[in-house]
Amino acid sequence: MLINILILLVVGLTFLAILQPKVYSSTGWRATITPLASIIGSGFLILGPVLVGSFGKMAVLAMAALCVLSYLYGSAIRFNIARIEVNPKRSHYELSLDYLASWALAFAYIVSVAYYLNLLGAFAISLLPFASALLAKLLTTLVFLLILIVGWTRGFSALERMEQISVSIKLAIITGLLVGLAWFSATITNHVGILQTPAEITGWPAIALLFGLLITVQGFETSRYLGEEYPAKLRIKSMRWAQWMASLIYIVYITLISLTFSADEIIMTETGIIDMMRIVSPALPLLLVAAALSAQFSAAIADTGGAGGLFAEASNNRINVRTAYVLLGVIGISLTWLADIFTIIRYASQAFAVYYTLQALIAALGAYQQKASVIKVVIYCCLAVIGVLIVFFAQSIEG
């Protein structure tokens, strides 16, 4: 009973703190919250069971590796932001790579929307006594059709205004979850000591699985496309802050999950975290479903709008925004019925790896042309190679 009160109190206080005028209206916070919300999205809900179930006591190191990789890709994008600001007239090769990157990101957004909405469907029916995979797919399809109809007829401006509120709710619930987990973990450790869950996979299969989870720490690249709203320095700073905050939250979360649950208590399904959290507090499952629904819907709206704009821009309006929405709906619904959620996660990781590979190549070429340090050029080239490896060798959890 006491832990329920504590969790709800923390959630309420955190939500009120975020909505304070000094915070809510802060330009720096608004610039930070967009990439932060994208990074700590749906991935937060599935990473705990997947990493601890697969990597055991090494899950924290696996999480740290994902965070470091994403931060390095973020550094390439930050370099590109700064370079464009100083020298908007780039070489033909850079412009060509940037053009390809726009197409890659547009298609990556399509797969990511499928990922978001399939998780939304799974979490929406997770608390129902008659929950099933078929019902989740039907609900996902209906939401796809709703988004398609709204985007075709009215656009997304009204729905996009919900983003900051939904992000605030999600961050408040995550804070409550971490506090509840910390309390429960301390109790477990006091009684049975520190759990030492063995790793289920090691070596190359472990690396391939991490490749397939890149999408779960993706989202920082949104700062690259906020140029009309914020200056380059603020976008660079806010992306860095968002990645630092997300990494801290993820590592604390995975640490607490690994300390709290034994191997036979880990449920490695897309909604496994819901059943696992029942052990911690009866209040958490409902809160997590609320966080999942708000996070998935707002992320899907944002990426749908982003995909439409990128298709129109990259094709010089030969593919208009409405046509892009139809393309997104057709591909997304097809993925929903042809693939399971973990396979869609892998596809999304591979799609974003293409985009990050191109961004790393742009950064390497730019660093070479402006005679930056050799180490920087080598790092960006290595990131491009890793991106190619992710595209070809990423595995889903069943792989």
Image (tube, rainbow, N blue to C red):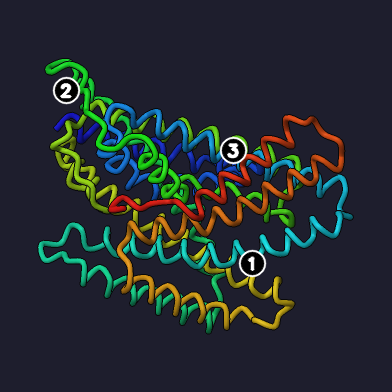
Question: Mark 2 or 1, which is nearer the eye?
Answer: 1
Q: Is residue 251 left or right of residue 130?
A: right
**Residue contact between numbered discs 2 and 1, judged by CB atoms under 8 Å:** no
- Mark 3 sits on what residue? 22
Measuring from the top left, give residue 236's x and y in whole percent: 69, 40
In this rendering, the answer to whether 52 lies above or below 359 is: above
Mark 2 secondary-structure assignment: helix
Pick the residue in front: 383 or 226: 383
Q: Residue at 56% of width from left, 44% of height from top? A: 386
Residue 393, label in figure: none
Q: Residue at 21% of width from left, 28% of height from top? A: 197
- Mark 1 sits on what residue? 103
Q: Earlier in the sequence, mark 2 or mark 3?
A: 3
Q: Earlier in the sequence, mark 1 or mark 3?
A: 3
Q: Is residue 251 left or right of residue 187?
A: right
User: In the figure, residue 51 lies in which quadrant?
Assistant: top left
Viewport quadrant of the N terminus: top left
Q: CA distance from mark 2 to mark 1?
A: 49 Å
In this rendering, the answer to whether 220 lies above or below 184 is: below
- Mark 2 sits on what residue? 188
Q: CA distance from mark 2 to mark 3?
A: 39 Å
Mark 3 secondary-structure assignment: helix
Question: Mark 2 or 3, which is nearer the eye?
Answer: 2
Q: Amino acid at mark 2?
A: Ile
Farthest front residue? 204
Q: Residue at 38% of width from left, 51% of height from top? A: 395
Q: Residue at 52% of width from left, 68% of height from top? A: 304
Q: Amino acid at mark 3?
A: Lys
Measuring from the top left, give residue 287's x and y in whole percent: 28, 47
